[in-house]
Image (tube, rainbow, N blue to C red):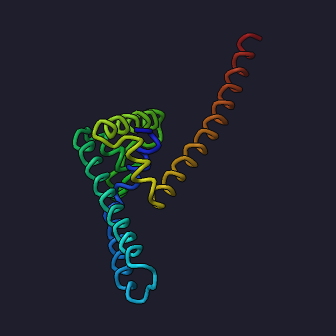
Amino acid sequence: MNVQYAKTALYAYPNIKEVAEQIDELVERKALASMSDCSPAIEQCEKVVEYTAQKCVLFALKIYIDEVLEKLKDIEIDCLEYKYFKRKPKEYFYGFDAESRGYFRRQIKLAEKIADKLEKAGASDEWFEQNCLQMDFFKELLKRVIEHEESVKKVDKKANGIVKEKQSQIQKKLTA
């Protein structure tokens, strides 16, 4: 699975239940509004079926992620909790190193590992595109993931430029 898709799924994971409840509310409203809706009944039924299918996709994704999470180490779960899930109180992460280079490298490797495990579990790019990306919720979430990664790359390039400039200044001093 594409790493960006995996990150999108991870951000969605703690909210799956709430999104499913919102879909239930939409279905209920659609059913109640059907008395005053003059559109053909088949169209109304198709919309309800579409919402129900979206709910099934959410639960399938939850099952895929649960399967992957069961195979991870505690430190990996803590990294996911810190970055993606945010279900634990801040006090839990007291002393948690979230600023070192090692943390960021660990997060990158962990995202790649999860993408691979999701693929093996059955959540391929094709599955994600055909199912999840049909929902506005996932489209918006993926857009935010991509924007965040692009902004991080810009910061990294700028930081690398500063580091290289300082290294060349040091090198000049050493050779002078």
User: In this picture, is 95 found above or below 31?
Assistant: above
42 and 13: which is toward the camera: 42
Q: Nearer the viewer, residue 159 or 5?
A: 5
Q: In which quarter of the image is residue 46?
A: bottom left
Residue 126, image x, y percentages: 41, 42
- Please provide percent x and percent y for residue 40: 42, 79
Q: Which residue lies furthest to the right in this view?
A: 176
Residue 169 shows in this picture: yes
Which corner quadrant holds the C terminus?
top right
Can residue 88 be seen in this snapshot?
Answer: no
Quadrant of the snapshot with the N terminus = top left
**Residue at the image position 30 percent from the left and 44 percent from the top:** 77
Q: Considering only vertical position in the picture, is 35 above or below 28? A: below
Expressed as whole percent of the image width and height from the top left, the position of residue 87 reads 33, 58
Q: Position of residue 23 (x, y in %)?
A: 36, 70
User: What residue is rendered at 44% in x and 59% in y?
Assistant: 135
